[in-house]
Image (tube, grey):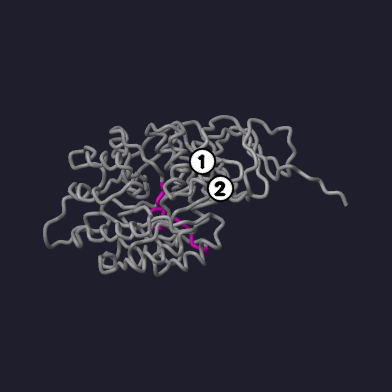
Amino acid sequence: MNTVSFPYDVVLTGGTVIDPATGLNGRYDVAITGGKIAAVVPDLSQVQAREKIDVSGKLVTAGMIDTHAHVYEHVTGKFGLNPDMVGVRSGVTTLIDQGGPSCMTIGGFRNYLVDTADSRLLCFISCYLVGGLEGHLYPDLYGPHGVNVDHTVRVAKENLDIVRGIKAHAEIGGQSRWGLEVIKTGREIARQTGLPLYIHLGQLWPSLEEGPVPDADELIRELVPFMEPGDVLAHPFTRHPGGFVSKEGEVHPIVFEAIARGVRVDVGHGSHFSFEVAKRVLDAGVRPFTLGADLHGYNVKAPSAGGKDTREENPFFGIAPFSLTIAMSELLALGMTMEEIIATVTSNPAAMVRMEDEIGALKVGRDADISVMEVLNGRFKLSDNSGVEVVTDRLIRPVFCLRDGVRHDSDSPLIPDAIAA
């Protein structure tokens, strides 16, 4: 019996490749063999392949990386979404869970999620023993008494293939209770593990009624000197007190000092995002290094395994469908270039987790993690969680992705329908 031999398994033809890591920006075909990228060249139309996929008019990038996910499903309460719903079914090949797993729960994260999901899963391990257990509801679980430096350091070192950083919170509700003690402890864990420290900004818990209310502006001035090159400040566009913008509406000068020292900025979109704050920060010259969607069960409607919406209304959070590509569309509407935005979800996050030799680029020999998107032209309505609406003329939507060369169509219920303006 004769079998036909093909040089490639899959060829994506006619697409526009934007790959900041290699500098490619233009029409290229991409070939995949054995789950690896085999070629990225201008024209493979005459080459045979088991399957050719016409992506003419589409945008082709390295597999997108969401730097701020909450996908420890069934363990972190309503926070934990299904990883593949947030990941490959939304056109995203790699997810970084921010603070869901802890030194006590990392085993479950690996065995029940990392080893079973189609999406690649990494994490920034929580510096708290309890991890991401709906902390906005139970602040008493998150003080200095709930941290064990030695245990967290040991577990992180034992799981460095998936643990790529340390997660902590800096906000005035916690500051009113514990000062900056947990941040100092998180810094020590990061120092002993050699991993970056990722710090949440923006008020999460109400301040204690007794005693003075902390100054939100003073918090960031005290915080930044603790940070080191490679550390990450999250939620620069937060609408909540304690972010990059002062009460006077100006970006804190110390933010620029931190960035100059090598501290990185992650959008960490979620319920924090404000168009007004984002414009102020961007106009001041601050550019985010990475873009995380920060999706969780309190800011999107997500069906359970039985198909029911298990969300409870919470006035602190929004409930609209959302996706990483909508966050990208918002940055586009705010004036960032497509090349800048693609870098925030490919090459830059790969550098953030020190995996630039493995992910974030369309290079021959790499795992065939590839995202394919379309850019719709028209008039579309975007809105933030404070109710502000913005009309844009371009909307980015996922079409499909390849994870290790396997196709996953973008059929996630989290992807919102385009809203015409």
Determine the image quadrant of residue 285: top left
Q: Residue at x 35, y 68 (%)?
A: 130
Tell me the kind of residue under disc 2: Ser
For mark 1, does the 10 Å Cα neighbourhood hold few (<14), some (14 to 19), or many (20 or more) residues? many
The residue segment tinted magenta is: 292-306
Q: Secondary structure at mark 2?
A: loop
Is 74 or 220 nearer to us in this picture? 220
Determine the image quadrant of residue 391: top left
Q: Secondary structure at mark 1?
A: strand
Q: Decide if residue 251 is on the left or right side of residue 66.
A: left
Labels in figure, total: 2
Q: Is residue 241 visible?
A: no
Question: Would you name the residue on which mark 1 appears?
Answer: 397
Q: Decide if residue 351 is on the left or right side of residue 237.
A: right
Question: Would you name the residue on which mark 2 appears?
Answer: 410
Residue 227 coordinates in the image, percent (x, y): 28, 50
Residue 57 coordinates in the image, percent (x, y): 59, 32
Q: Residue at x 63, y 47 (%)?
A: 36
Most frequent secondary structure within the magenta stretch = loop
Q: Say whether disc 2 or disc 1 marks the residue closer to the N-terminus.
A: 1
